[in-house]
Image: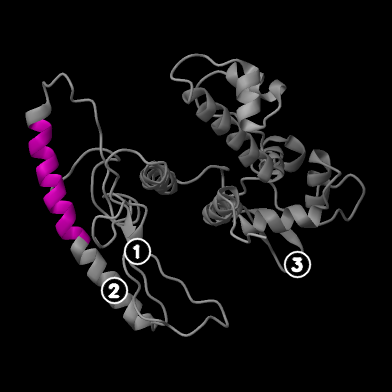
Amino acid sequence: MDATPSVSEVLAAAVGKLLRPLVRLCLAHGLKYQQVAELLKAAYVDGARAEHDNARPNVSQISVATGIHRKDVNRLLNAPTGPASLPRSLEAEVFTRWVADPAFCDADGRPLALARQSAEPGEPSFDSLTRAVTVDVHPRAILDAMARLGLVDEEPHGMVRLRVAAFVPAPEERRMLAFLADNVRDHLAAAVSNVLGAPGGFLEQSVYGDGLRTASIERLHALSRRHWDRVLREVARLAQELELGDRDAADADHRFRVGLYFYSEPLPAGSPPAQGPKPAQGSTPAQGSTPAQGSTPAQGSTPAGPGPDRPHQD
């Protein structure tokens, strides 16, 4: 029997790896599985529709291609355009009731500090607050989830207080999440295009090593930043020159993004001994061993650049 894994099995393993950092991000911000599943359904339907070259495919075609029930396909095809409307999480529901329900606010409308449990019947407490939202999940589990998200503080004497005034990310966090979406989307799009055999192939390479001390990782990170600073200046300068020259061209209808990333983490316990630096790898069709550039443009956690798509020169 041939033990070689099928393409589907290899792809499933690759998708599993890609999902783990996204799941970590979703858990850190309270985005639930049901919400992500709805986003994934919509992305599948959009992707299947795009494969039909602008012709509107029928519901059955998309259902067969994606494995999504025809009822959901029809709903998503007819959904209004714009940001997805997702059901709120339990944490958000409890937070909203706490700041809006007069039973859990003072005379000025400010959320009360609540005892974990009511001392007297009818007295507002965190347990009664959560029970007003759901009886299917224990209040302790909801309290732990809200504490993990940084929404509440549980004090030693049993009181629970809100830490924030709104269940929305801070402006800087919103900016970083927007950059993450743009940068990682384009990095992944480049790799996917290469795997699917797009003509030419995009630069998408990396070099990696293991068995290193923290001080060695810091030296490599500093070296990568210095090289990125040089690449940023050269690419931004050329991009500005080309943009001026292409401004009135009828076929000036393309955009680009180029970047670099660096990541490190401790090796799992019991990892095999280090084998030395590994050669450059990536999805770029073989054209020599060009060391890798990732795709964190002049934004994100590396300061530079005025926006997601505009070149910038220091």
Label 2 – label 3 distance at C-alpha = 48 Å
Residue 66, position in %: x, y? 62, 31
**What's the mark number on residue 157?**
3
Check disc 1 and report the residue beneath it: 262
Question: Position of 301 compared to 18: left or right?
Answer: left
Which quadrant: the N terminus? bottom right
Q: Are marks 1 and 2 in contact (CB under 8 Å)?
A: yes
The amino acid pointed to by label 3 is His
Which secondary structure lies at badge 1? loop
Foreground of the two, 73 or 174: 73
Mark 3 packing: few (<14 Cα in 10 Å), some, or many (20+)? few
The boundaries of the magenta stretch are 228-244
Please check the rendered image and state whether residue 239 is part of the magenta-colored stretch, yes or no: yes
The amino acid pointed to by label 2 is Leu
Of discs 1 and 3, which sits in the foreground? 1
Question: Is residue 261 visible in this depiction of the protein?
Answer: no
Of discs 2 and 3, which sits in the foreground? 2
Q: Residue, x 85% and y 47% (percent of image)?
A: 123
The amino acid pointed to by label 1 is Phe
Foreground of the two, 97 or 20: 20
Q: Residue furthest front?
A: 1
Which secondary structure lies at badge 3? loop
Dot placed on the residue nearer the N-terminal end, 1 or 2: 2
Q: Residue, x 36% and y 70% (percent of image)?
A: 208
Label 1 – label 2 distance at C-alpha = 9 Å
Which secondary structure lies at badge 2? helix
Check disc 2 and report the residue beneath it: 220
Residue 26, position in %: x, y? 58, 50
